[in-house]
Image (cartoon, helix red, strand yellow):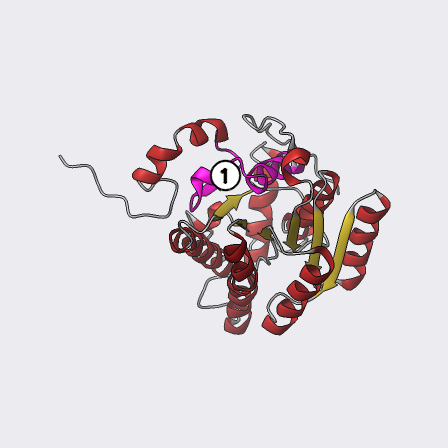
Amino acid sequence: MSTAISIAPTTNLPSIPAGQKLAGRVVLVTGASRGLGRLLAGTLAGAGAAVGLVARSAEQLAEAQYELITGGGTAVAVAADVSDPEALRIAVEVVSRRLGPIDVLINNAGITGPMGAAWEVNLEDWWRTLEINLRSVLTCTSLVLPSMIARGHGRIINITSQAGVFRWPLVSAYSVSKAAVIKLTENLSVELKRTGVTAFSAHPGLLPIGLSEPALESRAPADSAEGKVSAWTRRELEEGRGVEPDAAVRFVLRIAAGDCDGLSGCHLSVHDDLEALIERADAIRRHDLYTLRRWELPKD
């Protein structure tokens, strides 16, 4: 049975001349064979960037590369399991050799992981989620940073989630992995200070594509963990609390194009008023805002 989905419009995301800022740049996107990663790759190529596509599914990856090239774009695809450090090393090497040094890295690859109470799920599957969602980000970042630092510019964009800021009961591996990536981003930003390289955590919103697709198609029993998570996902989308994929793409492209460089280290959301944040970047840095931090109760 098909589900009618109403997506709430996302405001404050004006179109930008991304082609002027991204033309000639080399952008590497992981998880580029489907979902948000594939949309990002296509839009980046349309903006004039040379795009490196990395994903595990060789067939879907080849299709994505074909679409980009036949559309007039420049793209190189390398099939690799992002949880395999050696496979990632080879992928980065191939992209860099064929397209040039990587200017922007978009760590987009990720999985939802096992669903259920943390003490009841398969612990190997739980840890596997951390390897894909967290270790791959650190590995890929460490592979591209030496070149970026040597050239004095670069951007690391880690696709995260509000599940890492708040919580996502029954999906703890995903929530913990995203919280770790957000905190990794904060540390990277400080360590990269004065190198010309910036790092961002980017929450693209709940989308009706990618990781949401299994939930929308699920027929799991309503009282099971998968059934409860799937029902929540469908309800959020049906009630308009999701985000149109195009809005998510524009949001990430603004970061890739450099509009948000003054906000390096921040956890940015597609729902944010980016113009207001950019205008107040100095105050945000000074007060360490838009990060994972401890909040204190107000004094009586």
Image quadrant in which the N terminus is located = top right
In the rendered image, the residue lying farthest to the left is: 300
Q: In front: 228, or 13? A: 13
Residue behind mark 1: 269
Q: Is residue 271 magenta?
A: yes
Question: Which structural element holds mark 1?
Answer: strand
In this view, 122 is above or below 166: below
Q: Is residue 181 magenta?
A: no
Q: Position of residue 59 (x, y in %)?
A: 81, 61
The residue located at (32%, 47%) in the rendering is 293
Q: In front: 227, or 291? A: 291
Q: Amino acid at mark 1?
A: Ser
Position of 8 with respect to 171 (left or right) is right
Q: In front: 60, or 262? A: 262
The magenta span reads 245-273
Position of 74 with respect to 248 (left or right) is right
In the rendered image, the residue lying farthest to the right is: 70
Q: Position of residue 249 (x, y in %)?
A: 64, 39
Question: Is residue 29 at least partly visible in the picture?
Answer: yes
Image quadrant in which the C terminus is located = top left
Q: In front: 112, or 195? A: 195
In this view, 245 is above or below 190: above
Question: Is residue 115 at least partly visible in the picture?
Answer: no
The residue located at (27%, 44%) in the rendering is 295
In this view, 230 is above or below 300: below
- How many numbered marks, from 0 up? 1
Residue 242 lies in what quarter of the image? top right
